[in-house]
Amino acid sequence: MADKRLLVIGAGPGGYAAAFYAADRGIDVTLVNDDKSMGGVCLQRGCIPSKTLLHIARLVNETKEAREWGLVFGDPKIDVDRLRQWKNEVIGKMSQGLAQLCKQRGVKYVPGRAVFESPKRVKVGEESIEFEHAILATGSRPIVPGDFAIDSPRLLDSTSALEVEDIPGRLLIVGGGYIGLEMGTVYAALGSKVTVVEMTDGLLPGVDRDLVRVLQAKLRKDFEAIHLGTRLEALQEVKEGLKVSFKGESESREEMFDKILISIGRQPNTENLGLEKTRIELDKRGFVKVDKSGRTMEQTIFAIGDVIGGAMLAHKASYEGKRVVETILGESQDLLDPVIPAVVFTDPEIAWCGLTEEQAKAEGREVEVCKFPWGASGRATTLGRNDGQTKLILEPKTGKILGIGLVGTNAGELISEGVLAIQLGATAEDLAHSIHPHPTLSETLMEAAEIFLGAPTHIFKKKR
């Protein structure tokens, strides 16, 4: 097996997972990384720093909520420098751990940018590296429209927003997707007055509306304003800050903000890689075209993660990386057909997997929907957070679980049970008859399944 030479380009969660797994399977692996540290966007400029800050935001909010329970704290004194230092310490600790794991596995780590010279060779600086197979895992970066790409420290993207240089008095977030809403949650908790503008008629386009409604109701209390069906028309930096013009369906307005976060999506990192020296093809948006096994048009080269599009999620990239390694080893895999969970780490969190109600309607599929309100959950009530909901999408005749959606505190920690249920083909009866500990939020999954069976314990359902 040692005669197989694998080159992995990119050390994010897809790249390093593939490299480590390949090394564990006996392959000779070289990992090239065009970044100062391992971990990619997820660890350095995304998942981990944002969740570190979101934990702090949740703690701040809980001290305010505790007043209703008879526990009164003073207003928090926020040390921005120490907060930033703590975030960086978390990143540094995890980066060091990855470097150690890389060394322990005997993976050759080469810092620098890999540029293809041929379908079997890349150049990194002055060094040429030959390989039998390669995995392209170069990730993505934030999109900033050219019309608004002014050179100003007041204009933020998802990377610079995570630096938390200061706490702006008024912060505008352009884009109501998960990144913008997560960062809005952070800055609102730290003291900023946050406004969101979203060009569609709802936050989190594409996400189940039942789940989004719960979150949107909470954010309307936490944020200064949410403008839906609204576009950012103009942006100008003046002495007082950033002057912007909005245009909605019924009115236009001008406002002043201290900082603006542009969060309207991400684009793949496929430029300046020498792809023209290979047969790799890109689609109209610049994503690498792959088949179901992750193989590009160049038979020796695979691609995974953000660079191939689809759900831009770290755990999806990690899964794809490992399955590609198995394909290289000759082990047949259905790479791109897993049950992929998604989590929006706002407050409350939203999590889902499998089929959504909207997808079922679009496909003309008959489904049964069972919703369990967290107002009937003992655990949610003890937490003072019974604004959540658990939702099951089921096959009417068999009760087979096709999709699960959750909104509420810690929803992201609950969704894995849904993934397992769908992956194993479980039914509502399987879920309802699996004993869940009381009182926990996980019981809401069991009780939602009981609704399908017609005998939920903690809500009353009239007989059909």
Image (spheres, rainbow, N blue to C red):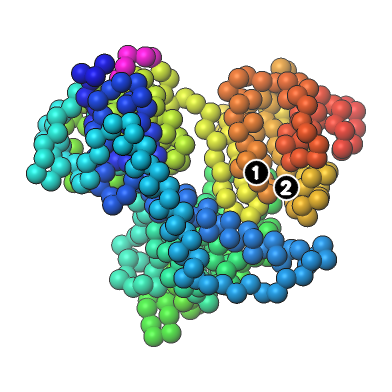
Tag on residue 411? Answer: 1
Q: Which residue is mark 2?
A: 388
Residue under the image location 46 percent in, 65 percent down: 84
Is label 1 in a helix, a strand or a loop? helix
Check whether the beta carbons of the residues at disc 1 and disc 2 lie within 8 A of each other. Answer: yes
Q: Position of residue 324 (x, y in %)?
A: 35, 25
Residue under the image location 75 percent in, 24 percent down: 434
Amino acid type of the residue that numbered disc 1 sits on in the rendered structure: Ala
Distance of label 1 from label 2 (alpha carbons): 9 Å
Is label 2 in a helix, a strand or a loop? loop
For the stretch drawn in magenta, the main secondary structure is: loop
Query: Which residue lies most toward the left here?
Result: 126
Residue under the image location 55 percent in, 36 percent down: 341
Picture layout, residue 162 above or below residue 79: above
Q: Which part of the image, by quadrant, shows the C terminus? A: top right
Q: Look at the image and give the residue range highlighted in magenta.
A: 328-332
Q: Position of residue 49 (x, y in %)?
A: 47, 55
Q: Nearer the viewer, mark 1 or mark 2?
A: 1
Please tell me which residue lies in front, 321 or 453: 321
